Amino acid sequence: MKKWFRGVITVLIMAVLMFGLLGCTKEGPVEKAGKKVDETVQKAGEQIEKAGEKVKDAVQDVTK
């Protein structure tokens, strides 16, 4: 009886793990939107950094 119960538990755990891994492979619309938001925020940050460098350079040119 214990071996049977142990085997059933093992099979259930394996099934849960397999379904969990399969669920992670497909990218849904929310994940795609999240990636686009991340990319947009990163690009905006880069542009802000470039603008800050230009302002810094302009201030240095004026103070010379």
Image (cartoon, rainbow, N blue to C red):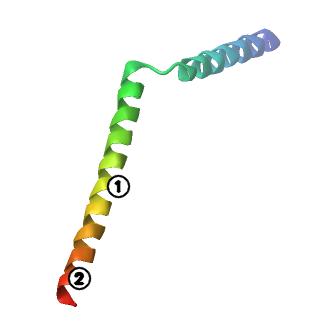
Q: Which residue is pictured at 37% across the width and 33% down the height?
A: 36
Indicate the position of residue 13 as horizontal and vertical percent values: 66, 19
Q: Which residue is pictured at 65% across the width and 17% down the height?
A: 18
> Image check: 13 left or right of 54?
right
Q: Mark 2 points at which residue?
A: 61
Helix, strand or loop at disc 2? helix
Q: Which amino acid does label 2 sit on?
A: Asp
- Above or below residue 64? Residue 57 is above
Q: Mark 1 points at which residue?
A: 46
Location of the C terminus (image quadrant): bottom left
- Above or below residue 44? Residue 40 is above
> Image check: 36 left or right of 26?
left
Indicate the position of residue 2 as horizontal and vertical percent values: 78, 14
Q: Distance between the residues labelled 1 and 2?
A: 23 Å
Q: Which residue is pictured at 29% across the width and 49% down the height?
A: 44
Please, which residue is most extreme toward the right here? 3
Q: Nearer the viewer, residue 41 or 16?
A: 41
> Image check: 40 left or right of 7?
left
> Image check: 11 left or right of 37?
right
